[in-house]
Amino acid sequence: MDNQQSPPHPDTRRQLQMARSMCWHCQSEVTGEYFCDRCVKVQPVSKETDYFTCLGFPRRLMLDPKKLEAKFYELSRTFHPDFYQTKSADEQTISLSNAAVLNTAYRTLRDSIQRAEYLLALETGSVKDIRTSPPADLFEEILDLQDTLEEYRASERDSDQGHRLRATLQTEQEALERRKEGMEAQLRQLFADWDKLQDAGEATSLARVERDRILKEMRDLLSNRTYVNNIVNDLAATIA
Amino acid sequence: MIWQQQSPKQLFPNILIFDMARIVGIDLGTTNSLVAYMKDGQPCVVPDRNGRTMVPSVVALTDNGLIVGDSAKEHLTRNPERTVYSVKRFMGKGLADVQDELVYFPYHVTETGGVIRIRLGQKSYSPPQVSAMILKELKLRAEASLGESITKAVITVPAYFNDSQRQATKDAGLIAGLEVLRIINEPTAASLAYGLQQKTQGTIAVYDFGGGTFDISILKLKDGIFEVLATSGDTHLGGDDLDRVLVDLFIGDIRDRYGIDVGRYPDHMQTVRLEAERAKIRLSDELKTEITIELPEDKGRFTRELTRDQLESLVAGIIERTLAPCRIALKDAGLTPKDIDEVVLVGGSTRMPLVRQRVEALFGKQPHCHLNPDEVVALGAAVQADILSGGTTDMLLLDVTPLSLGIETMGGVMSSLIRRNTTIPASAKEMFTTYVDGQTGVDIHILQGERELVKDNRSLAQFRLKVPPLPAGVPRIEVTFLIDANGILNVTATDMRTAKSQSIEVKPSYGLSDTEVERMIEDSFKFATEDVTARKLIEARLDAEALIKTTDKSLVEAGHLITEEEADGIRTSLSQLSTAKNGTDSRVIRARMAELEQTAKQLNVMMLDHSLKQSLQGKKVSEVS
Ligand SMILES: Nc1ncnc2c1ncn2[C@@H]1O[C@H](COP(=O)(O)OP(=O)(O)OP(=O)(O)O)[C@@H](O)[C@H]1O
Ligand SMILES: [Mg+2]
């Protein structure tokens, strides 16, 4: 497509950033996804390709980890630099960069939380916002907890007070962990809702409202969960 | 959308990959180094003439020049100031990093340009240069055995090596005249050797405790894919540290008993160190052992008994230090000990019974080491070499970066870009802009480590990003940090407004600059002729010695069969050759050898006759009986 922008021997790195439709090597049109049909050279994964597409999965939130892994292994065998050692320098550069994209894609999609955050960013075009204040329903509890933490940090670990505070913090940690699990259960429900809606594939206004509801609830839950998760980690590290 | 899967080989099954020069696999160890290659689908280690597979990682400067390996090891006590060992501990390090352990090294260590230098005679050598000498020795060994020139290698490093240490290893290869096609991690290399042997599936933990470093790697093996889930370790923890505990014990004893400070005598320090190591090794098989050390100033010898129990209580703390990384790696992999199907032991220090006990207690299963723990890393490197040359296609190693990579942000805080245990190749992009109108550069400081603050992490490099002078916030420079399959960082930058990439000159914090490496490569070629001269001399002397010995023997056995005149001629030639042998010119030695061969011709003929007759006689005798 971008004919005038394709010099005969293009700089591979620049080429990587362009939407791809033409083989960087022989300039014939590329129809296969990874290799030019004519000259069999590996093709760069387009910068526009999202991680779902990259791994060959639809934008769903309940992915089978076994299938994901199988696809990751298969594509690793396709792109890994180990298999390009005997090829040209350009092909080696492409393989390296494709493998890096593939690894990021797999890392993101493998974890259900990261996967949801990524999908949210794709669907709503915004980066995940990092919460700095506690979620409303946890406000009081978290403030109390912060005080206890301070007290514990200042106290003699081996004193009676130290032991008492530690016990309190432990109970608190368990409670928060349960809450986190609750949030994750809610998230799983939303994931299922999302997938069902996508599978139905309706373009009605009702479907649009449902989509927006799921995304909004998911965003809130994800950021609350991250907040709680950080506190749990902090707690665990302090009383460890 | 499902992507079509086509690989080039499926499309053209009959195309043969063009013949590639052989790639060898090298285990460049703290104590011992080995070279291996793939032969008929099986990796094998290259032995020397005497069948020994390990080359001690020791380099000595002698009057005849630099020597490496077994012969250099003999100089440890004879010539301690000029004999370098355990140089791997200095790779990619600055002087401040190793200050605490310098007392244990008899050779002189300084620093120039953030890189350690080791003084040998009149010259100073960086650790990569010393390592290059070991690599050259391995290269020669492989060339002699395979009868072809070797220019490409896979070299192993501890999994927990940081970027500077990996880069230093790569530099060592270059200086030795080797193209380092891949740096791979020692425990993962071991897993390749195991995988090839047993077609193992499941989750394995590789516990690698060698001479200078400790690594733990947890891998998932499935359908030929070796996926590293997590790795951890300590690049300054090994058998050397165990030896030091004993060294301290012995010199304390000697001080108490004889009032001698052995620390003041480098040669005796080496004797103590070597005896400490030998005692440690003996105690892996025996319950107690006798220590004997010659004392300086003719004070006689120091003896004492050491039991395995005593050794174990002394080193228990050090061995305990290997367990924390194991727990971290398990946690990072999201696993508990019972998820591990197999525990594999690698490295000489895993021969210690206490190590085995502790590992077994941690993982709750008996560890094994079916393959020789000394050789398994080199064998794995050969397998990886074969993968790279297209020989082995069903195996693929997916390794991880051991340390988080980040950049310095405001307030001296490190902002992480690529987390530890991320599968490599891995990349991260970061957009940079300016804060002041007309600003023409942005300084970027790259770090590796797990801590919050910049000062607690390892500085890798610093560079200045060039920015066109524009109003503040307008320039947009995208920097890509890419960790390649060697675990080595590559940085590129692109001006998003013009889509032009800019080259970046990175100043490594603890490494040789490119120009310095180039100079060292040149030097090493210059020295190559010197090295060849030294080698020729040594060979000529050995040959001369052999010739003198056989001629002497012939004179005794067949001297009565030649004329007195002839015998005198031979004796003259013999003494002339002896004189030449003590000189330093290999050509003179060769000439005198030729002369002797000439004068001894008649003797040899008679000798041949003589032995022929004897053997015939022997036959007759045996036929008769
Ligand atoms: N039987 C034994 N018992 C205890 N320790 C031993 C035994 N045999 C060898 N070692 C120790 O093992 C170490 C050498 O192991 P190895 O050859 O695996 O190390 P390396 O590969 O050179 O080092 P690294 O992998 O750390 O760079 C030495 O410290 C040596 O003393
Ligand atoms: Mg080793």
Image: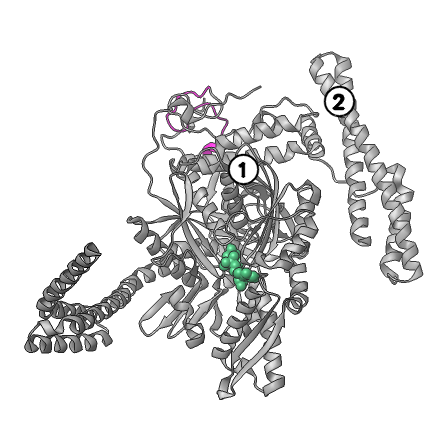
Q: Residues within 10 Å of mark 2 (few under 14, many from 20)?
A: some
- The segment highlighted magenta reads A13-31
Q: CA distance from mark 1 to mark 2?
A: 30 Å
Q: Which mark is residue A100?
A: 1
Residue identified by numbered label 2: A192
Q: Residues within 10 Å of mark 1 (few under 14, many from 20)?
A: many
Which image quadrant: the N terminus of chain B?
A: top right
Q: Residue at x 46, y 23 (%)?
A: B6
Q: SS at mark 1?
A: helix
Which image quadrant: the C terminus of chain B?
A: bottom left
CB of mark 1 within 8 Å of CB of mark 2?
no
Q: What is the chain identity of the residue bearing mark 2?
A: A
Q: Nearer the viewer, residue B404 or B224?
A: B224
Q: Residue at x 47, y 67 (%)?
A: B85
Total number of numbered discs in the rendering: 2
Q: SS at mark 2?
A: helix
B226 left or right of B597 in image: right
Q: Earlier in the sequence, mark 1 or mark 2?
A: 1
Residue B492 lies, in percent from the top left, at 49, 44
The kind of residue tagged 1 is Ala
Q: Is residue B138 visible?
A: yes
Q: What is the chain identity of the residue bearing mark 1?
A: A
Q: Residue at x 14, y 69 (%)?
A: B591
Colouring of the image: one colour
- Give the vertical position of A96 relative to B369 (above or below): above
Residue B560 lies, in percent from the top left, at 11, 74
